[in-house]
Every structure is written in structure tokens, then in C-alpha cells.
Amino acid sequence: MHEVVQDYYGKQLQSTEDLKTSACCDVSNMPSWLKPLLANIHDEVLSRYYGCGLVCPALLEGCRILDLGCGSGRDVYALAQLVGPTGHVVGVDMTDEQLAIAKQHQNYHVDKFGYDNVTFLKGYIEKLDELNLDPNSFDIIVSNCVINLSPDKAAVMASVQHLLKPGGEFYFSDVYADRRIPQHLVNDPVLYGECLSGALYWKDFERLARHADFLDPRLVEDRPLEITDPLLAAKIGDIQFFSATYRLFKIATLEDACEDHGQAVIYHGTIDQLPHHFNLDKHHAIETGRVFAVCGNTFRMLKESRFAKHFDFIGDDSRHYGIFAGCGDILPFGHPANIISDSNAALSVNSGSCC
């Protein structure tokens, strides 16, 4: 599939207007404080970028960041402004035409920002070991609608785990499906290039993440994708696709379920642009100054990451009170049998996120 993707993004597409769906274009609601970053980026870099939003977690100053599938470099140059002169952003892509645009305008951005803190490397995101990147060397790894294009997603996840520092995070947007994609659709070059037929079934993604020791994937935001091209829609049929942003923390002590240890946190409101609340994920909007009860995993994510100094932490894990209420799991015992027949079967979908 490498050749298919390289041809599609290097030769077939000349601008975002050439895309046939909204899967790989920026239609998400971008925070107003991020928009000035894009205004500083060269027009050609912007027009030849095909990501699904701006992948930008909070608190980046001084961080070392790796961007997987950086394309023309839009996110690299946006993140470069946020990490500042003491940070560094490395972009990796396999498509010569895309990298040529990113590198062609590198001096433009040095002049614009007043410092040079980006590096572009040619390589495959499932073969990062070939790029001589040091293990445990990145605070954050990002990716913007690219992992679905990889033929070996397990290798990508394993490399991310290897390259992140302890306490670091993988913060990325991608496309997911509500079911597994049939092979004849995976083999369709346009559907694959449009970030559709390479998409993971959402439950398989969770399994893949946990197999790579990211035991508690956190869903940050999501939106349904509309397939507006009638020919593609006819091929896809009833499969539903979603663009979703996840964050995965490299923390060895995370558990595979949200356990209740009677812990809580208090957010100080001291992160730039987040004075009133801190959104860890879709289910955790932590209001400034409020004592906020959390499961053991959320406690560790905040305490063992770059966010720690912005919180007070209450309690420890010396006592256990069972599963954290509302996280998706319930005690399986003591309930009457519930026999579901084919005639009244219901489908229940759980996000897999905590609390």
C-alpha cells in the first residue's frame, strides 16, 4: 500500500480541493487561539496539507515532539511555534513531493519565527527504527489522519511506545469505522487514499493500543464523517466512519480498568488558554479549584505527566473500593440472567474511555 499512498498524496492530489471526502481535510472546530499559528505558515504548506484537524495538546513549551506522517509540514510548523526555541519538532513522511514542500519553505519559517527548531526525515512510520531516533526521547508524539494509511499499525504503536519518554503521550487524530472493512474495499486505491478503507474498527484499535501497553486509551473528541461523493458512498454502503482524537499515555503503572482508590485532584487553572477547566478527555472536564474525584488511572495520568505541577493530588492507592462508578464496567454478579434472542438483540457501543 505504500506505493498507492505515495502516488495519491504525491501525484494525484494537488490541493485539499482534490479530496473526495471530508475524512482528510480540516473541518473540525479549531480553538480561536490556534488560528494565528496557521496565519504564520506558508500558503503552499497549508494548501498541500491533508490532515483531519490541528493535532495540538496543551502545555507544549520546551517539548520534543515527533509528527508521524507530517506531509507538507503544516502541523510541524504550528507545533514549532508552541514548543518555542527551547523545544524541537521532528516530522517524518515517506512521500518525496510532500517533504519537498516542507523543506522548501523551512527558511521562510525560520525568518517568521526567529528560530530554527524543526527537522524533516524521510521514512515509514511503521519502520521508525530505521531512522536512528533515540528511545525514550520524545515528550509527545502526534499524528494527523495518517495511521489508517499504514499497512502495519501494530508496528507503529510499538514504535511509539519505544520512542516516548516515561510519562509522555501519543496524541493523534485518525479515522475509525463501526465495523471491520472488507478486503475488497481495503484494496480500492481511492478509498484507501481517502483515509477510509484503511481505517481500523474502533474495538480493534482499543485492542491494538492495549497490546502495545497503552492500557487506557482516552477519547478526546470525535465527529461522524460524511461521504459526499456518490460513487464512494455506493461502495461503502452502511459502514459508518468517524474522525476521532485519542491520547495514550506511556505510564507503566496504568491498569486495564478504571479502579476506585478514593482519589481526587484539584486543577489550579494555570495552563495557558485553559483558565477555567482542563479537558483531559471527552469524559473529564476538570473545573478550576474544584475537588474532582478520579479513578486511579486518571490520577496517574495527571501526576506522572507534564501536567503534574498544575494539579494538587489527594489520596493514594493504598485502599481499593472496586471499579470506579460510571466507567463502563459493572459488577457481573447478582443480576438475573438476561437471554437475548435474535429477534430482540440490541447493539451496545461503549467508548472504552474511563469514567
Image (cartoon, rainbow, N blue to C red):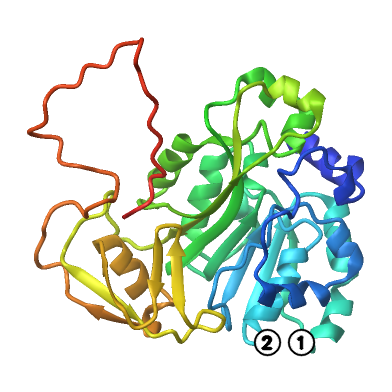
- Residues packed near mark 2 inside 10 Å, few (<14), some (14 to 19) or many (20 plus): some
Residue 304 shows in the view: no
Q: Tell me the kind of residue under disc 1.
A: Tyr
Along the line of sight, the residue nearer the viewer: 316 or 338: 338
Q: Secondary structure at mark 2?
A: loop
Determine the residue positioned at 63% across, 80% down.
83
Along the line of sight, the residue nearer the viewer: 189 or 233: 233
Q: Tell me the kind of residue under disc 2.
A: Pro
Label 1 vs label 2: CA separation? Answer: 6 Å
Would you name the residue on which mark 1 appears? 115
Determine the residue positioned at 83% across, 45% down.
9
Q: Is residue 265 above or below residue 327?
A: below
Mark 1 vs 2: CB contact within 8 A: yes
323 displayed left or right of 1? left
Where the C terminus falls, by quadrant?
Answer: bottom left
- Residues packed near mark 1 inside 10 Å, few (<14), some (14 to 19) or many (20 plus): some
Badge number at residue 85: 2
